[in-house]
Image (cartoon, rainbow, N blue to C red):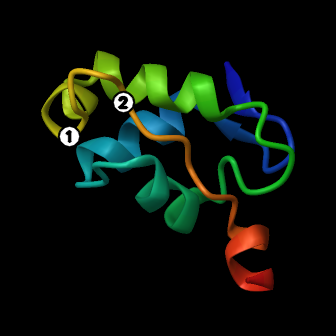
Amino acid sequence: MIVCVCKAVSDRRVRQCIEAGASSVEELQIELGVATCCGCCEDSVREILEQSGVCASACSSTGCAPLVFMREAVAA
């Protein structure tokens, strides 16, 4: 299933990147470009991280902080 339409990234590719060591949305942004355009895939990417057991160890009990889009970080 395509997770990020803007960058044509599938859930399989996200899972492969997590298995290879990515442990945050920010790392997946850098590696795959997910959640760097419109941001619609952010929730799906976070869900895949959570299903993989990565988010549970990296996030606080109040949940993950919203990510900063790369274009916003560059503009700042």
| Inter-mark Cα distance, 2 to 1 | 10 Å
User: Label 1 amino acid?
Assistant: Ala
Above or below, 72 relative to 75: above
Classify mark 2: residues with Cα within 10 Å, few (<14), some (14-19) or many (20+): many
Secondary element type, mark 1: helix
Q: Position of residue 21 (x, y in %)?
A: 23, 55
Task: Classify residue 10 by image quadrant.
Answer: top right
Secondary element type, mark 2: helix
As drawn, is 30 to the left or to the right of 6?
Answer: left
Q: Badge 1 is on which residue? A: 58
Classify mark 1: residues with Cα within 10 Å, few (<14), some (14-19) or many (20+): some
Q: Residue at x 31, y 22 (%)?
A: 62
Quadrant of the snapshot with the N terminus: top right
Task: Classify residue 71 by image quadrant.
Answer: bottom right
Task: Classify residue 36 by image quadrant.
Answer: bottom right
Q: Badge 2 is on which residue? A: 49
Q: Position of residue 63 (x, y in %)?
A: 35, 25
User: Label 2 amino acid?
Assistant: Leu
Q: Nearer the viewer, residue 52 or 58?
A: 58
Residue 10, numbered circle: none
Assess whether mark 1 and mark 2 are in contact (beta carbons under 8 angstroms).
Answer: yes
As drawn, is 33 to the left or to the right of 57?
Answer: right
As drawn, is 70 to the left or to the right of 27?
Answer: right
Quadrant of the snapshot with the C terminus: bottom right
Q: Position of residue 35 (x, y in %)?
A: 69, 47
Q: Residue at x 84, y 36 (%)?
A: 5
Above or below, 23 relative to 46: below
